[in-house]
């Protein structure tokens, strides 16, 4: 029996029941430890805990947790109704905080809590607690339109808050900073947070005017500022970028392999301007394939510790929004010397691979090189060559057509190899929002991924895996892209969900393989349940992240994986290049292994955080633009698919990826009950049934741009399928519980989002590969 394990179990038991006192015998029984040796160990650990003041001894000789030790730290997640939850332990359920116990903490504040009521044993219901201290405020500033109103309470005016996480709060401006004009969009620092004296408002100083409320694109800029995404490069950073030559100097090619004679091409979207990867392929005499993936050597220009490097690290990633890109590097680099532009000499890091007919990399070489792109190809052109067999395009690139056909062969081999090892292939539609000159959305189109897009994805995956495996086996500090094995509890819940639909899975949740999940998707492919199963499977997965530990990529079925192929737009790739150069130049020994040993973990955590910030910003802008687009289509009908079902209604998705809520109060043809086992809403009287993946006809009834939401209602509820999922009720015609009584309305949206995160994984569930941006995202 490990003493540390026993000590933790004793502390957890006492903390879970702070009002109880325990004899040694009771504690041993509750922890299921028996025998004299276990009894002695418990006594010994209790004595140590008493010395550490973690427990106290009662008057009758029993033990209980020291009340002063019940303070725990965590992140507060607010709900519009005033209550909240605090995540204080990755393994334990969140603590519930009642509205009058929050100390006015705001969403994502770091707080200290005290447990007031323990969680229920053998239940996923967490404890109740109260906030006793706000350790760190998440919000330090706000963004919004400045207005002057009749209820400004003597302040200069108000900043109108659109952030849905701050709903219900006002923000007053003091006469100490800038004096903006009504209608200007400003940033303001918070000087006073909600308190007992003013629970419903904050106070602050205007620091910057970022534009006028009528300026095109100002709505997107507000989202960018709200997420703290750096959008302007400091002058000294731009000056440092301007000092870099716009062409490769002769002395820079020394020590690099000259590959300018190879047929190297870039393949990207039409609007892409930061071209960071070039590829080539040919068939070898032995029947194998040579694949060359050549990546812009950004680390040659962005030296460690420079202003450019510090700014790139701060940004972490380029952020791709509907009508603009916020780049990680100044455009002089990203679109210039670091971009593999056609016909221009460029510095690269190359990954040359020999791949056999089974898709295995049997030889590889990673080395610095100097290259020149033969052609700036687009996905459209390559798809015309390979899929459409377009005569005009094939004639235009007749010298390269044989190479593209070889690439297509190699892609199919690599794809089959990934499928054999169990890589999970989710069909994930991506929307392109078409904007007019005024920055308003006028159309939403689906991007289709053709053979060219999938082919480049295969090549980037192969290079990323090869680089990761090479440096893992060299046992050097490195950064990996990891996707951990799903939590067994969530997998078990997913399997139980499948069982409810007649899908039997013979697998151990504690030893899950990606092949198991791939087989499940294969079973439901083409069936009505396919969408529902895909959604629930995604929710059972972990979120991909960067790490200094190589634990593999579950979704790809890869033992080794990193990000090597996009150093123009991702800092981890740039840092990986820097590591490769360092080990190439200095060799690998105990001394060089220590150089970056203390840095890689910190860089990995930071890059994961900036990636999440970028993804959240992109999603919010997309949601806002989709809501604005739908304001032009109120009253119109659409075919839709149910994407989520909750107690308070269901979310539906249109073919163009617009998602919105049908609140249960709008489902007034019956009283609908939520059947959790099947994640379905079933009419008590009619037995009309709605489940994930189901198609239905809907009408758009509202769209709120500020809240980024869209509301729908069902057009013909009588067309809904019937089921016997709901047990028969004795009082079927009882009208007392009409669905219209569910009147908590739009406030439930954020409740849904918070519940969904907690229920389906505290750390999210996305593991998008995103080897490079698709057509219009890379500019």
Image (cartoon, rainbow, N blue to C red):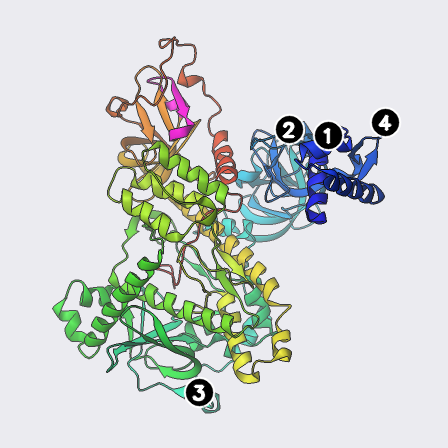
Inspect this view and state whether residue 39 appears.
Answer: yes
The residue that disc 1 covers is: 26
Label 4's element? loop
Mark 2 lies on residue? 98
Residue depth check, mark 3 versus mark 4: number of the one nearer the observer: 4
Instruction: Please tell me whether mark 1 sits on a helix, a strand or a loop.
Output: helix
Q: In 3D space, how far apart are the residues under numbered discs 3 and 1 (Cα atoms)?
A: 72 Å
Q: Is residue 479 magenta?
A: no
Q: Does residue 104 sit above or below 672 in this rendering?
A: below
Taking 191 as reference, is 406 left or right?
A: left
Q: Which mark is residue 256?
A: 3
Residue 459 placed where, x, y %? 34, 68
Magenta-colored span: 664-678
Mark 3 or mark 2: name the one nearer the start of the chain: 2
Q: Nearer the viewer, mark 3 or mark 1?
A: 1
Single out the mark in the foreground, 2 or 1: 1
């Amino acid at each position: 029996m490990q003493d540390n394990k026993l000590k933790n179990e004793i502390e957890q038991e006492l903390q879970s029941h702070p009002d109880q006192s325990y004899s040694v015998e009771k504690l041993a029984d509750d922890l299921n430890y028996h025998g004299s040796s276990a009894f002695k160990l418990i006594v010994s650990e209790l004595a140590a805990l008493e010395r550490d003041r973690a427990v106290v001894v009662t008057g009758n000789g029993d033990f209980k947790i020291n009340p002063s030790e019940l303070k725990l730290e965590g992140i507060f997640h607010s709900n519009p109704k005033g209550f909240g939850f605090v995540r204080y332990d990755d393994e334990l359920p969140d603590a519930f905080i009642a509205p009058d116990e929050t100390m006015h903490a705001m969403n994502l504040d770091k707080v200290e809590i005290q447990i007031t009521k323990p969680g229920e044993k053998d239940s996923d219901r967490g404890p109740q607690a109260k906030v006793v201290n706000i350790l760190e405020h998440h919000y330090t500033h706000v963004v919004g339109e400045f207005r002057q109103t009749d209820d400004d309470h003597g302040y200069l005016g108000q900043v109108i808050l659109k952030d849905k996480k701050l709903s219900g709060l006002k923000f007053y401006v003091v006469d100490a900073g800038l004096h903006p004009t009504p209608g200007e969009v400003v940033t303001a620092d918070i000087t006073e947070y909600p308190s007992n004296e003013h629970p419903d408002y904050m106070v602050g100083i205007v620091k910057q005017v970022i534009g006028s409320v009528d300026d095109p694109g100002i709505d997107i800029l507000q989202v960018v500022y709200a997420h703290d995404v750096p959008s302007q490069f400091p002058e000294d950073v731009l000056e440092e970028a301007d000092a870099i030559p716009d062409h490769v100097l002769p002395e820079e090619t020394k020590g690099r392999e000259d590959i300018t004679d190879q047929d190297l091409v870039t393949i990207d979207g039409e609007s892409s301007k930061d071209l960071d990867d070039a590829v080539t392929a040919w068939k070898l005499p032995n029947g194998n394939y040579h694949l060359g993936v050549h990546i812009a050597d950004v680390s040659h220009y962005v030296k460690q510790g420079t202003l450019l490097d510090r700014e790139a690290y701060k940004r972490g990633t380029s952020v791709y929004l509907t009508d603009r890109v916020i780049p990680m590097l100044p455009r002089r680099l990203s679109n210039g010397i670091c971009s593999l532009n056609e016909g221009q000499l460029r510095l690269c890091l190359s990954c040359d691979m020999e791949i056999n007919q089974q898709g295995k990399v049997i030889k590889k070489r990673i080395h610095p090189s100097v290259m020149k792109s033969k052609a700036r190809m687009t996905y459209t052109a390559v798809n015309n060559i390979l899929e459409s067999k377009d005569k005009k395009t094939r004639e235009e690139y007749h010298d390269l057509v044989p190479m593209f056909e070889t690439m297509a062969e190699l892609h199919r081999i690599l794809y089959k190899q990934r499928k054999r090892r169990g890589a999970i292939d989710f069909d994930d539609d991506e929307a392109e929002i078409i904007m007019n000159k005024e920055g308003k959305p006028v159309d939403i189109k689906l991007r289709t991924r053709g053979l060219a897009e999938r082919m480049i994805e295969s090549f980037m995956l192969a290079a990323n895996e090869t680089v990761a495996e090479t440096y893992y086996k060299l046992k050097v500090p490195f950064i990996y892209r990891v996707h951990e094995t799903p939590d067994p509890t969530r997998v078990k819940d997913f399997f139980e969900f499948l069982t409810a639909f007649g899908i039997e899975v013979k697998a151990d949740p504690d030893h899950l393989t990606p092949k198991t999940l791939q087989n499940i998707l294969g079973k439901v492919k083409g069936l009505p349940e396919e969408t529902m199963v895909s959604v629930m499977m995604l929710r059972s997965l972990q979120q991909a992240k960067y790490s200094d530990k190589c634990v593999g990529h579950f979704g790809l079925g890869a033992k080794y994986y990193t990000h090597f192929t996009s150093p123009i737009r991702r800092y981890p790739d740039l840092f990986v290049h820097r590591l490769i150069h360092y080990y190439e130049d200095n060799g690998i020994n105990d001394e060089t292994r220590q150089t970056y040993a203390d840095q890689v973990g910190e860089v990995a955590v930071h890059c994961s955080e900036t990636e999440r910030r970028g993804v959240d910003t992109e999603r919010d802008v997309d949601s806002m633009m989709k809501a604005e687009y739908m304001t032009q289509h109120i009253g119109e009908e659409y075919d839709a698919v149910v994407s989520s079902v909750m107690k308070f209604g269901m979310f539906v998705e249109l073919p163009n990826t617009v998602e919105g809520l049908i609140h249960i109060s709008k489902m007034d043809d019956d009283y609908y009950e939520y059947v959790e086992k099947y994640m379905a809403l079933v009419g008590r009287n009619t037995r009309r049934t709605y489940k994930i993946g189901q198609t239905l006809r809907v009408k758009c009834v509202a769209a709120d741009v500020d809240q980024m939401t869209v509301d729908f209602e069902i057009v013909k509820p009588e067309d809904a399928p019937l089921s016997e999922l709901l047990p028969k009720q004795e009082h079927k015609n009882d009208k007392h519980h009409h669905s219209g009584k569910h009147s908590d309305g739009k406030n439930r949206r954020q409740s849904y989002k918070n519940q969904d995160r907690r229920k389906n994984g505290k750390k999210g569930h996305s593991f998008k590969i995103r080897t490079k941006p698709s057509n219009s995202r890379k500019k």
